[in-house]
Amino acid sequence: MDFSPTPDTPEQQAFRKEVAAWMKENVPDIQGDRDSDENYAKYREVGRKLGAKGWLRPTAPKEYGGGGLPLDQAIVITEEMAERDLGLPPYYDSGGWLGGASILVWGTEEQKKRFLPPIFNGSLVTWQLLTAPEAGSDLAGTTTEAVRDGDEYVLNGEKIFIGGSHGCDMMWTIARTGPKNERHKNLSWFMIPSDLPGVTIRPMDMLGDGGEGVGASVKNTIYFENVRVPASALVGGENNGWQVASTHLELEHGGGGNIGRETWFSRAVEMAKKLKKNGRPLLEDAEARTSLVDVFVHSEINRLFGVRNFWMNRTHQPMAYEGPQSSYYRKVHGLDITKALHDAFGPYASMNDEKWDVSGGELDQYMRGSIVALHPGGTADIQKVIMARRIGMGRDVAESAGKTVE
Amino acid sequence: MDLSLTETQQLLKQSVEDFITRDATRDTLIEVEQTDRGFTDEIWRTASDNGWVGIVIPEEYGGGGAEFTDAAVVFEALGKGPVPGPMFSSGILSGQILLHTATEAQKKDYLPRIASGDIICTFALTEPDYTWGVEGVHLRPTEDGDNYVLNGTKLFVYDAHVADFVITAVRTGDKPDDVSLLMVDTKTAGVSTRKLAGFTTSESEVVFENAKIPKSAVLGSVNGIKAGLDKAITNSTPILCAYKVGGAQAAFELSVEYSRRRVQFGRPIGRFQFVQNHIVQLVNHLDAARWTTYEALWKLDTGRDATVSVHLAKAVTSEGYRSACDYAHEVHAGIGVMREYGLTLYTRGSRSLYHAMGGPRYHRKRLADLIETIAADPE
């Protein structure tokens, strides 16, 4: 077995040098609130520059605006971004990631050429619109309707827990296009501009404040009121949305894997050096050290599930329960990690007080964020239900994982 | 990155699985479990003749010279049986200790015989006030001419009841690391071994009563083996972890199969979400154990520092195998505790091996000692 993400050949080393040099030149050192408008603009600028080089979506096909690079080089780019505490893309674009992957599998050639380049080159940000107020985890029960009218569909309905704090250009949304009682055979996906007449975006008041992405606390409600979208925005065939969703959900549930290492353990160690307990650094306290080991152990298991999934996905191994397992573990053990930090740091772990905060608000945000993160992409319980089907518990034929090409 | 098994590893795995299907079925192992020795000559001869016992002993000493991951694949397959016997104690642990602490002459003397299965060795570290690590070594020999004289007890020694030699850790100085190893022939007058009763596999006691051990039986040098012993323990531990991963894998497969077959309230129990939750938790423990173990092995095989990964793997695997069996029992209910069903073979192993090579608390404590190192270089 070889757990090293990339071979350490001279070619790879040379490529890493090239990437690092480019990033030094083009990726600014961003300080302060990562979610501020000013910093968000900087991340978008980095995204466009990466996109121009084909490094924003390095393995995506070149003909659709991706980098067309081999996996080994893509890993180097991912790692070099991670060195700077940034992901690919360096901002929230879950609709671009999951919608893009779905279009690659299910879109027509014309749709791929139309939708994918602006996603892959960083000029657009896309939100994903799945959850509906009545439907929640029951994605197939979505109440948003799209009714065909000539060359258009007319959308009506409401989506919740969407996006982040900086708006979007496109919306990747699922809606009901067939009769209500034909479950799983009445759904379709649309890739639509967010500025169409009849689209309203309203921020939700949630547990935390700030941040984007999974576990983020700024989310929105989206209202569709007679929104007219061209029929050409429908991806994957009318009423075929449940099949298209299998691609989207497989990746969202962690089937694509991740080679990154969480930085919580190292950051917590740094904080524990600075905080004093009985006149000595907290890090010298035996019980605090025990709690920090809990953080380490959980993080390592979480990382290894991601590494395994990354390898399985990129080398096209047949996958079953591994995606939702990684999602379940991340959700539940996110709570475990915040409990360990709570034990280690005491009341400071929930402090965001200007005078007494020891972590720049990070501990407090993480404690809130881990609670928020329990539901996006399906609750922890939903992940278990999917695992049960994929393992084949109580059934002779196990369900297979969704098709992806990432 | 490549997490698949090599062709060689697949063949090794297949050969162990073939042996289990042919000669070590669950029904056979349930019978063997009740014997005094706890394994059979046939198991031992097969494991020796196929090179599984000596798999990581270098070729120059009669072994297979294979990588640690190769050995782990074999031991995972054995653990899935679970095939009992002193394969780990003798071929892996004792083999590694000799390799990293003994003189060249001692290696040439013992290693080929260990690899061939002609002698069985084990390692005695712990004592009645159980502590893993050399800090738990209190047995202090007295000197009598060319001999050491031992009086005392080594406890929870795996496989001592069938061993020809027990590598016995003794205290030979006043500094914490002043520990030496004696190659004790179990036929020596004053040395007795006995398998312990309980929810155990092969835990034994070794009692020394005025046992005279020649000074030539000191492995390497007096007070000079601590680093070599640490290395041997680090190298061996993940292979024991792999054996436990195999056991957890079996508990998983039994549980999934049972969830399909067993009907209650008119439907297979695997359709009940509480039952599903047990298997979900089981497979999470299994996979955490598997991947922490194989990453540690990869680090060993590629010359990376594996200390942290080995502590992690052993903590996660001990906890994981134990919990995997607990969840399997929740799925199986009554049938699971019937000896004839076979699940208890694994449950017994998950308990017996929980503390082998140090329990989870021990390894978590070592990780706590290493926090600054880990934080500075997480890889």
Image (tube, coloured by chain):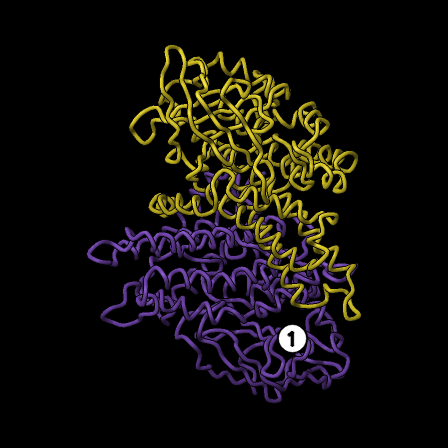
Q: Chain of mark 1?
A: A
* Residue A55 vertical placement versus B178 (above, below): below
Chain A shade in the render? purple
Say whether residue B216 is visible: yes
The quadrant in which the N terminus of chain A is found is top right
In the displayed structure, does residue B175 sit left or right of residue A110? left
* Residue A296 vertical placement versus B108 (above, below): below
Name the foreground residue: B271 vs A268: B271
Q: Position of residue A235 (x, y in %)?
A: 68, 71
Chain B shade in the render? yellow
**Dot 1: what SS?**
helix
* Residue B132 vertical placement versus B360 (above, below): above
List the residue tagged with mark 1.
A139
Name the foreground residue: A320 vs B221: B221
Which of the 4 quarters of the picture holds residue A33?
A: bottom left
Residue drawn at the location 37% of the way across and 35% of the way down: B135
Residue drawn at the location 50% of the way across and 74% of the way down: A163
Q: Please, which residue is most extreme toward the left here? A: A279
Say whether residue A61 is visible: no
In the displayed structure, does residue A174 sit left or right of residue B105? right
* Residue A207 vertical placement versus A401 (above, below): below
Q: Position of residue B235 (x, y in %)?
A: 50, 32
